[in-house]
Amino acid sequence: MTRTARLLIVGPQGSGKGTQGARIAQALGIPTVSTGDVFRANIAAGTPLGEQVKAITAAGNLVSDELTGQIVRDRLSQDDAAAGFLLDGYPRNLRQVQDLDGFLAERDAHLDAVIELSVPRAESIERLALRAKEQGRTDDTDEIIAKRLAIYESETAPILDVYRERGTVDTIDGVGTLDEITERIVAALTARGITRPAAV
Ligand code: AMP
């Protein structure tokens, strides 16, 4: 059994990774670290960071690796993330994988599992269109959705090959009810011996 639960959830926009990530993090008692949420919260609060990333995120582009990496390092350095965390939206390209590897290696740590949520492209687009209506996210317009999905394919999907080579990826069918999908993820993590981490 692993005593840590350092996890990453990866999937295209509209795969449900935010929802499932939150459920898994809650089940395991670990914090979710979502870079997208950090940026959105800062934009909503009008902070200097928010002002800096507003136009970039609204256009569907990626914020710089340096800035994003700093945010993640700060968050993962907090006590509540010592034994486990669930990353959502970071790393998002190969450079960020390297940055995260470096950060974790300094702490003698590594990711215990990478959950890949697999959803057909047509279904992702449908779910995003629905979310746009419900949540009014400025980066959920048709054109920006297409751009974000293209960036996912070209920059983010390749990170899965790196993790696959390390044997850490569990590919989960992301089509079904919320509970069914959560159960699939929990089963895959349990099979790896990943449960609620021991308190540190
Ligand atoms: P998300 O909610 O994960 O889709 O993130 C929303 C937006 O925040 C993205 O379209 C990017 O503009 C920005 N963002 C989130 N995570 C990252 C990251 N790891 N690297 C660069 N930009 C990011």
Image (spheres, rainbow, N blue to C red):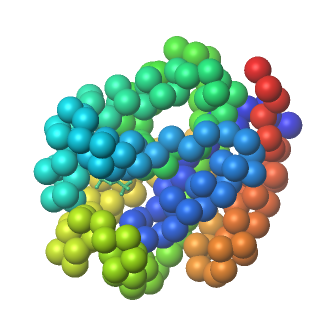
**Residue 57, above or below 178:** above
The image shows residue 11 at horizontal and vertical percentages of 47, 62
Name of the residue lying farthest toward the front = 45
The image shows residue 164 at horizontal and vertical percentages of 55, 50
The image shows residue 95 at horizontal and vertical percentages of 32, 36
Q: Which residue does the image show at 72% across and 75% down from the upper left?
A: 180
**Residue 61, above or below 49:** below
Image quadrant in which the C terminus is located: top right
- Please give the count of numbered marks on the rendered protein: 0
**Residue 66, above or below 115:** above
The image shows residue 67 at horizontal and vertical percentages of 27, 31
Residue 125: quadrant of the picture: bottom left
- Report if residue 106 is visible in the image: yes
Name of the residue lying farthest toward the top = 106
Image quadrant in which the N terminus is located: top right
- Report if residue 167 is visible in the image: no
Q: Is residue 69 left or right of residue 7?
A: left
Q: Which residue does the image show at 62% across and 21% down from the upper left?
A: 79
Q: Which residue does the image show at 46% across and 46% down from the upper left?
A: 34
**Residue 168, above or below 75:** below
Q: Which residue does the image show at 42% across and 31% down from the upper left?
A: 72
Comparing 184 with 81, the one in front is: 81
Q: Is residue 141 left or right of residue 7?
A: left
Residue 31: quadrant of the picture: top right
